[in-house]
Structures are given as structure tokens and as C-alpha cells.
Image (cartoon, rainbow, N blue to C red):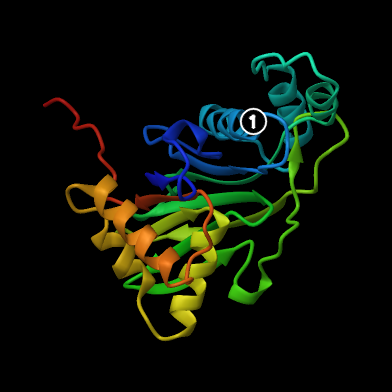
Amino acid sequence: ALTVPKSGAKLDENEDASAANPAAGRFAVADGASESWQAGAWARHLAIAFAKAPPDPDTFADWLTFCRASFQPPAAADTWYAETKQAEGGFATLVGVSFREPSSGSGAMWKAVAVGDACAIHSRAGKILVAFPIDDPSAFANRPPLIGSVSGFASEPEWLAGRAEVGDLFYLLSDGLAAWFLAAAADGRNPAEILDGLFDDPPAVRFRDWVESERSQRTIRDDDTTVVRIRIDPARRAETPQ
């Protein structure tokens, strides 16, 4: 996972969040809505909750109720403006993917959920197989669907499932980077190869410098920017003692 905040912002002001539970095959990216209350904390809470115990279509409502009940950020300052913001709650987008071994064969079965414009990209040999929930770089808007930390404020989630082969890559991307990825692919470039090169040592520095360069060229919006890269490796099965 790699992330950089908005230009001029401190690391702890980054309102993107990611969480990973590789042993259980669960990964998530959430993007806090900047104008909302404790947006970064709410995004982190959602991402971590997914990595611990992801929902499915039948349990999403109960999962979200639990997330809201267990969300305990610092209390708001004692001003009318802060109290109003706290009453409205925090908002964030979310994309999460969970993997499991197939009943036969190699690779992995995957299931994704998304609310808003954080995206999951399934790539094979540099080609996009799936872009979810948005596959058009022109479809990103200023008001995406959001999940609110207060009861009653949540857009309906979207769901998708599929199968991956050994060697396939998945990228979980906050909205600005997702828009760049899809636009680069539409222009005939290989965005997967470009991102993969940023994971060479030192990845944090490479990613920061690259994002700043793209921002200066206005190819990536100046916003918190996050990528989680997941590679499907062969299953490590325990050997039976002889």
C-alpha cells in the first residue's frame, strides 16, 4: 500500500485509508469526504472493519450498524459549528475485496463491494479485465455516493464477484488515481506497469515524487492519493507429514 496526502498537507491529515489482512485475503481502501466531520478517522474505521470481517449483501446493513456503533473518534470542540458537523457525521467512500481459494484449480475467487468512486482494478498481463464500480474515466464526479457514520446516511453498495488466476494483479485506488489509471489505459498506455515500477525501493519516495509530478501536469487531481496492490500467488498448502 502507498499513499500521499494533498499537496502541502501533513501525513496525519491524509483522509484516505487502507487496510489489509493478507492471511484472510481481505483488503480495503476508503476515502474520507473532506468537508465532513472526522472524515479520515471514519475512513480508517471502515477500512479496518472490512479487513477484520467483510460484509456480504445479506449482512451489509448489520455490518454498517456495528461500524457506526463502534466508531469513537475524539469529541468535537465546543462550538456550534463543530457540534453541527458532529451531528451530521463523517462520510467516506469504500471499496473492499475479499479472496478465497477455489474448490478446485489454482488462483482465487474474489468478491468486491463498493460505495462511491474508490475503485478495484483486476489486471492480467497489463490488461484491465475488470474496473469496478467505475470503468469510464469521464464518469468521476464531485459528489459520489458515500457511507455516513450517522444512521440514515448511506448509499446502496454495489457488488461484483469473479475468479482470478495466479499472477493476476488487483489495484484498490482512491478516486483521483482510479481516474488516472482508466484514462491512461484509454490512451493506450500501461498504467499497471507504471504503478508496479513505483513499488521498487524506496516505494514511499518513488510514489510521492511520481504523484507530485502527475499533479503538476494536471493528470491527477490534487487530493489524497492511495493505491493497494494485491498479487495472486500460488497457494501455500501445508505438507502432510510422512
Q: Is residue 223 left or right of residue 216?
A: right
In the image shown, does 216 or 173 lie closer to the viewer? 216
Residue at position x 44%, y 64% from top?
215
What residue did someone put label 1 on?
42
Corner quadrant of residue 167: bottom left
| Quadrant where the image shows the N terminus | top left
Residue at position x 64%, y 61% from top?
133
Q: Is residue 158 left or right of residue 13?
A: right
Q: Position of residue 211 (x, y in %)?
A: 38, 59
- Relative to 171, does residue 45 appear above or below in the rendering? above
- Residue 16 visible: yes
Q: Is residue 141 left or right of residue 129?
A: right
- Relative to 124, does residue 146 appear above or below in the rendering? above
Q: Position of residue 45 (x, y in %)?
A: 59, 28
| Quadrant where the image shows the C terminus | top left
- Relative to 203, does residue 129 appear above or below in the rendering? below
